[in-house]
Image (tube, rainbow, N blue to C red):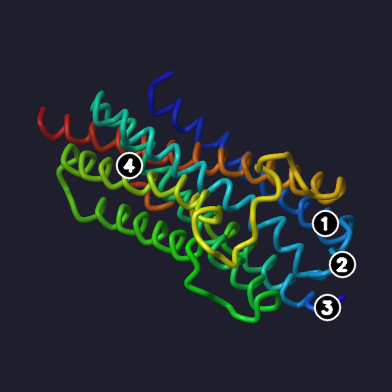
Amino acid sequence: MPDNGGFTVAAYIAAVVIYLCYAIYLVRGGRAKG
Amino acid sequence: MTPIEALERARRSSAVWIGVGLLLMAAVYVRALVFTPVEAVQGPAQKIFYIHVPSAWVAFLAFGILGVTSAVYLFLKDPRLDLFAASTAEVGMVFTTAVLVTGPIWGKPIWGTWWTWDARLTLTLFLWFIVLAYLVLRTAIHDPAQRARYSAVLGILGALLVPFIYVSVYLFRTMHPMPVVLRPGGPSLPGAMLATLLFSFAVFTLFFVALLWHRYALARLADVRARADAERADA
């Protein structure tokens, strides 16, 4: 079995950073111009 | 209850659901990384699939909604539809970004390259640029009716790409894997992997609805307040 777990961890961290940053941005009011 | 009070209430409720969505996403992570078997051929990198595919599903759902809402706007000219379309575009853009980031991280260990100009990858990147153009266009036009009309046309054009991206793996010679759930003959995944994927689909969809609800409430609040300010200035 290939040893590529580092890529898995990197992808999971990247995804959570994207979603978390957007969620925080939105809850803090976003740009809110429509 | 005044419209502003109702929208403030929606903003607070949706913020709570965003928090619930994030907690459930943590549960998806634990289930996928700890409790789902490792695929024998691809190894642990296959687990990227449990966040990449649900993100792609939500992105396509968002742009489908964008297309329908934009088309209905052109008939009804209701500004709320325009605000809803803009909200779906922004939230959908975030999920597409996650797709375009997680895909290459899987591609490197499995294909040996971060990126290839394959039909599905190229069209998805093209869609990302169309939605970016949609969001930039909205900041460039100040007349609300004109902005809504031009945006609706671009939104429909972007949404038309979605079914094309879905069938691109059948139409072209492509390196991208074929569908394993929504495919003729039913899902081809083992039970434990399919359960994790379906759980992830449900959580990502809930998280999308919460983000969209919140984004739309913010847009409506800004719109209602701007109209009230304009009326006060006229008086």
Q: Is residue A34 visible?
A: no
Q: Check disc 1 and report its element: helix, strand or loop.
A: helix
| Res B209 → quadrant | top right
Q: Position of residue B37 (x, y in %)?
A: 89, 59
Mark 4 and mark 1 in contact? Answer it, CB < 8 Å. no
Mark 2 and mark 4 in contact? Answer it, CB < 8 Å. no
**Labels 2 and 3 share a subunit:** no
**Labels 4 and 3 share a subunit:** no
User: Spatial distance from mark 2 to mark 1, Cα to Cα?
Assistant: 20 Å
Q: Residue B120 carries which label?
A: none
Kind of residue sitting beneath label 4: Ile
Callout 2: chain: B
Kind of residue sitting beneath label 3: Pro
Q: Residue A2 carries which label?
A: 3
Mark 3 and mark 1 in contact? Answer it, CB < 8 Å. no
**Labels 4 and 1 share a subunit:** yes
User: Spatial distance from mark 2 to mark 3, Cα to Cα?
Assistant: 8 Å
Q: Nearer the viewer, mark 4 or mark 1?
A: 4
User: Spatial distance from mark 3 to mark 1, Cα to Cα?
Assistant: 21 Å
Category of crowding for the residue at label 3, using alpha-carbon neighbours closer than 10 angstroms: few (below 14), some (14–19), many (at least 20): few
Label 2 sits on residue? B40
Mark 2 and mark 3 in contact? Answer it, CB < 8 Å. no
Category of crowding for the residue at label 1, using alpha-carbon neighbours closer than 10 angstroms: few (below 14), some (14–19), many (at least 20): few
Q: Check disc 2 and report its element: helix, strand or loop.
A: loop
